[in-house]
Amino acid sequence: MVSQTLLIDADDTLWENNVYFEQAIAGFIERLNHCHMSAQEVRLFLNEVERETILERGYGSHSFAHSLVKCFERLAEQPVTPELHEFVWGFAHQVSNNPIELISGVPETLNYLNGRQHHLMLMTKGNLTEQAGKVERSGLKGYFAAVEIVAEKNPTAYKGIVEKYQLEPDTTWMIGNSPRSDINPALAAGINAVFVPHDMTWVLEHETIDPPPAGVRLLEVQQFSDLQQYF
């Protein structure tokens, strides 16, 4: 097989991520204990607050903390004391302090892909320091020829990576779990994509997957280790 360039997502593709945010959100909603809004209604309100905060502060646990505090301040039916403020902020600290839990089959599959002479690049979005720290702690950095941490994954970002590394679009693939950030913008940028679904993909990353443009390929696998069947 001709050597391929594989751009690989990090959070919820290589290691668990959103499950920890979901645990923190559940604890937050329980602590808020709103008298007139259901847990689902509070969650929908928080989703909108998160969209707002992302525009201001980008992604990551620090941005998440600001979303929780903002949501609590807007919905709390009691005065928000400094102690409550610190308690709510603690839910985000809880997320950032979780150890890296690799998804099953990831190291073995990366080792296999390297052995097949494919060119692996890690491409993730979010806070530079936070994401770089995750990459280091994961123990996976050595599998990748490059690590790219971008503020947003959109067609412009993908085209920028193609140009920066002088990649051939027809042998370049974006591999990830997010339709919104990994699959649709990569297809729009003219590169191939592999969708690796994850049960806990963040709700703000949900999106209908677009049909690939002419000449662009789209694959869907059930789990990361299935890449060995195609590459």
Image (cartoon, rainbow, N blue to C red):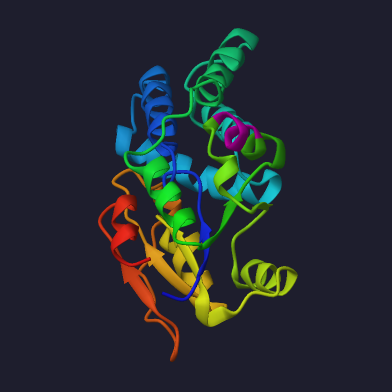
Q: Is residue 92 left or right of residue 40?
A: right
| Furthest-right residue in this view | 164
- Magenta segment: 133-137
Q: Position of residue 114 (x, y in %)?
A: 49, 54
Q: Position of residue 31 (x, y in %)?
A: 41, 17
The number of callouts visible is 0
Residue 57 in which image quadrant: top right
Q: Main secondary structure of the magenta part?
A: helix
Q: Is residue 182 left or right of residue 141?
A: left
| Furthest-left residue in this view | 222
Work out which quarter of the rendered image holds the N terminus and state it.
bottom left
Residue 83 in which image quadrant: top right
Residue 135 magenta-highlighted: yes
* Residue 190 in sight here: no
Q: Position of residue 32 (x, y in %)?
A: 42, 21
* Residue 101 in sight here: yes
